[in-house]
Amino acid sequence: MRERSTRAATLLVAINPLHATLGIAAFWLAIGAAGLAAPGSLRLASRVLFPASAVAGLLLAATALSGIFQPPTALVLPLGLPDLPFHARLDALSAFFLFLLGGVAAGVSVFAAGYLRQGEGTPPGLQCLYYHVFLASMALVLIADDAYFFMVAWESMALASFFLVTSDHRLPEIRRAGYLYLLIAHLGAIAILLCFGALQGGSGDYTFQGMRAMSHSSGWATLAFMLALVGFGAKAGILPLHVWLPEAHPAAPSPVSALMSGVMLKTAMYGLLRVSLDLLGVTVWWWGVIALALGLATALFGVVFAATQSDMKRLLAYSSIENMGLIMAGFGLTLLFRSFGMGTLAALALTATLYHCLNHAYFKSLLFLATGSVLHSTRQRSLGRLGGLIHRMPWVAWTALVGTIAIAGLPPLNGFVSEWLLLQAFLFTPGLPHAYLNMLVPVAAAAIALAAALAGYVMVKFYGVVFLGQPREATLAEAHDAGAWERIGLAWLAAACVVLGLVPAAVIGMLDPVTRMLTGFRIANLSHGWLFLAPIDPQRASYSPLLFFVITALLVAAAWVTVRLFYHGRVRRAAAWDCGFPYLNARMQDTAEGFGQPVRQVFEPFFRVEQHLPSPLDATPRYREDAQDRLWYWLYLPVARGVERVTGLVTVLQRGRISIYLLYSFLTLLVLLFLVR
Amino acid sequence: MISLSGVAAQFTEVMLAVLLAPLLTGWVNQCRAWLQNRSGAGVLQPYRMLGKLFQKEVVLAHNASPLFRIAPYLIFGCLALAAAIVPTLDIDLPLNAAADAIALVGLLALARMFIALAGMDVGTAFGSLGARREMMVGFLAEPALLMVLFTASLISNSTSLSTIVETLAHKAFAIYPSMAFAGVAFTMVSLAENARIPVDNPATHLELTMIHEAMVLEYSGRHLAMIEWAASLKLFVYSCMGLALFFPLGVARGGDWLGILFALPALAAKLAVGGFGLALIEIMSAKMRIFRAPEFLGTAFLLAVLAMLVHVLLEA
C-alpha cells in the first residue's frame, strides 16, 4: 500500500506540472463545450460535468503543489498568431496561485453541482460553458509567459465572468451591474496593456523573458508600476476603482460570486506581484508607500461599508474589498522592505500577503456558498428578512460559523495567522532607514488593527442576523438544509480553513520557494518545528495554533465535565424571559440597519447620507435613510458628466441629413488629396 | 523547552487564576461598598452566588440553539487560557510560546464574539441591543489594546509576553515616557472591556443603559454561573496584564518554585491595591451615555497611538 502511494507520488512528480496544468485547462474547456451540447439538460451539467470539473480542480491543486517545489518549466505553444506563438511558463509563483485556484475550484464546483437550477436565467448548459471558460482562463492567466497570451487569457476571464454576472439578465439592476463591471474591467485592461508596453522598453519583445532581461530606467519602471497598480488594482477592487465590486459580485450566482471573490481577485494580485517583483528589476521605496496607503484606505473603507449593508452578498463583497486592502498593504510593505534591501523582512511581509490570499480565497468562497444555500432555501437575500436559520439549516450554519470566525481574524483559524504575520511584519518597520516612514508605521499598524476589529463586528452582524435569533419572516419556517453536493462543497472549504489555521508551519514551508524566488530571501526561522510558528526567532514571537486549539478544547471540556460531575444537568424549556416582557416578536430584534448604526455614527464622514423623516403629523409615517459611497459622487459622476459633454460635442457633426454627410466625404477627399499630393 | 516543572507551574497558575478570580470581583465590590459607606456583602459573595447558580436549574428559551448552550463553556475556556498566557506569577511558562500578545488579544476577541452571538441567539430586543453595543465597545477597545501591547513590544523587541515582562521587569531599569501614555490608554480600555463605570455598570439592570448584562439576560442556572465566572476571569486577566506591563516587580522567572512562592503575596498585594483603585475610579465617575463611549474609547486609541509615536520619536 505504502509502496503504491510512493509510486503514485513519484508519478505525480514525473508529470511536468506545466503540461498537467495545460491539460486541465483544456479539460475544463472541453467540459464547457460538452455543456453546450445539451444546454437545457440539468442532469448532464449537475451530475456529470460539474463533479468532473471538481476532480480536475483537485488534480490541479496536487500538480501545482508539486510544481511549487520544482524548477520553472517553460513551453512555446503551437497556438496564437503566425510568428507570435503563446509562451507558457510555470514557476513557484504561478504554481502557488494555481494551487489556490485548484483547491477553491474543487469545492465550488462540487457545490455548484447541487446548486444549479432549471429556469434561473441562463440555462444550465450555457452556465456550465461560461463557468468552465472562466476557470480555464484563470488557469491560463497564471501560466501565461508573454503579454499577448496574458491579455488574451485576461480578457477571456473578464468576458466569461461578465456573462456569469449577467446570468439573471432580465433584472435591470443586474444588467447595470454587468455594464459597470465590463467598463471598469476594460479600463483596467487598457492600463495593463500600456504597462506591458512600458515594460518592453522599445525592444518590441513582448515575452516576459525579454522584459525580465531588460534593465528599466527608473522613470519607465515607475510608469510601468503605476499602470500595473491601476490595471490590476481595478480588478482587485482597490480604491477608487472599487465601485464595480459590490455591484457585480452579489449579482452573480453564488458559486460564481465565490470564484470571483475567492480566486479572480487573487489573479489581480498575481499580476501585480509578477510585474513588480519579477518583471521589473528595480523597486523604488515610495511605490511601497503608495501601495500601503491605498491598501489601508481600501481596507478601512471596505469594512466600514460592509458594516452598514443590509444585503448579505453585498456585505460579503465589501468585506472582499477590505481583505484585498489588507493584502495590498502587505504587498506595499514587501516593496518597502525590498527597496531598502531588508530581504528577510520582505520575505516575511510577502509570506503574510500570500498567506492572506490563500485564506481569503477559502473563507470568502465558503461564506458566499453559504449565502447561496440560504438564498435558494429562503428566496431572500436581504438581511432584514432572514434570521434563526441555525435551526432549519444546521449544516450551512455551522460551516458558516467556521468561515465567520476565520474571516473575523480570530484564533485558532486561518484568518488570524495571516493577520498575525502581517502585524509582525509591521512591528519590524522601525528599523527602516527613513525617519518619516518610521513615524508613519504606527499609524499604519493602528489602521490594520482597527480594520481587523471592525471585521469582527461585521461578521457578528452577518452571522447573528442570518443564522441566529427568530425568523423575521413566516416563510423561513419552510427553509431546508443544503443538499448532499452542497454539503460536500461547504465542508471541503471549511476543513481547508481549519487546516490552514492549525498547521501554519507547513503552509509557510510551501510559501518558501515563492518568497525565495521573488525576494531572494526566506523567512529567518523556518525550521522551528511543525508545532510552533516563529518567523524570526522564538524569543521574538511565536504562536502555536495547534497547541492553542488543544488547550482551549481541553479547558472547555474540563469545565463542562466538572460542572456535570458536581451538579445536576436539569434543563427546562420556557418562553424567552426578555425582562418579563410577554409580547416578544421577531420584529423587536435588531435589523441589519440597526446593527450597523453605531458604525455609521462613528464613521459618519465616510458616508453620504440621505434621510427622509416624516413630519410628526404624518398619518402613515415612512422613514428612509440611505448611506452611499461619497466617491461615486466625487469621482464617478463628474467623470461620467465630462464624457457625456465631450460626446455631446460630436453630435454637432451629426446632422441627420445625407447632403451634409456627402459634404463631409467630399471635404475629407479634398484634404486627403491635398496631403497626398 | 517544555519541562515537567514548567507544566506543573502552568497548571498551578491556571488553577489559581480560575479559583481566585471571583475573589478579586468580590474585593472590588466590597471596596466599592466601603467607599459608598455601605457595609457590603463580603468578599466571598461571588462564590456564594456561583454556588447558588450552579444549584438552580437551567431555563432555556424555546428557540435557543446549541450555540447558546455551548457558548458559556467556550467563553470560560477562552478566558482560562488567557489567564494562562498572561505572566502573573512566573515569566517562563510553557504556554507563553503557544500564544503571544497578539494571540491574547485575538483570544479575548474570540470570547467576545461568542458572547455577542449568544446574545443574539434567542432573538430578544435586549440581546441584540447588548450584542451590538458590546461589539461597538469591542471594535474601539481592541485596536487600542493592541496598540498598548505594541508599544510594549517595540520597547522589548518582541511580542512574546514573557519577553516583554522580562524586559520591563528585570533588564535595564529605564523610564519609558511612552508607557505613561500606554498606561492611561490601558486603564481606559480595561474599564470599557470589563463593563465598568463609566462605560457600563455591572450592577445595573436598567434596560436602556446596560451592555454586558443585556447580552446575558437569557442565561440562567449553570450557564449564567459560567458566564459570571468568565467575567470575573476577564477582570482578573486584565488586572494581571496591567500589572505585568506597568508594575512587573516581583514576578518569578523560569519555573522557580521559591520565586513563585514569593510572587504570590506580591501579586495579591498588587491586585488588592489595583482593585481598590478600580473601585475608586468607579465611585468617582458617573456612567456616560452610550453615545459618548466612542469618544472615550477613541481617546484611548489615540493615546495608545501617541504612546507608540512617543516611543519611536524619543526612545528608539
Image (cartoon, rainbow, N blue to C red):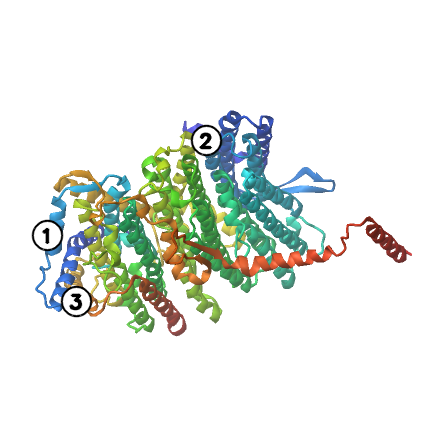
Task: Measure the C-alpha gap from mark 3 to mark 2.
Answer: 61 Å
Which residue corresponds to mark 1?
Answer: B48
Q: Front-most of A428 and B127?
A: B127
- Residues at marks 3 and 1 on the same chain: yes
Three-letter amino acid code of the residue under disc 1? Arg
Secondary element at image label 3? helix
> Split into 4 quadrants, where in the image is the C terminus of chain A?
bottom right
Of badges 3 and 2, the one in the foreground is: 2
Q: Position of residue A245 (x, y in %)?
A: 52, 49
> Split into 4 quadrants, where in the image is the N terminus of chain A?
top left
Three-letter amino acid code of the residue under disc 3? Phe
Crowding at mark 1 (Cα within 10 Å: few <14, some 14-19, many 20+): few
Q: Is residue B161 left or right of residue B46?
A: right
Which residue corresponds to mark 2?
Answer: A114
Q: Do we see residue A96 in this rendering?
A: no
Which residue corresponds to mark 3?
Answer: B276
Crowding at mark 3 (Cα within 10 Å: few <14, some 14-19, many 20+): some
Of all chains, the one bearing label 2 is A
Task: Measure the C-alpha gap from mark 3 to mark 1.
Answer: 22 Å
Q: Position of residue A627 (x, y in %)?
A: 45, 56
Q: Position of residue A226 (x, y in %)?
A: 60, 59
Give yes or no for contact between labels 1 and 2 (Cβ–Cβ under 8 Å): no
Q: Is residue B168 left or right of residue B310?
A: left
Q: Do we see residue B281 in this rendering?
A: yes
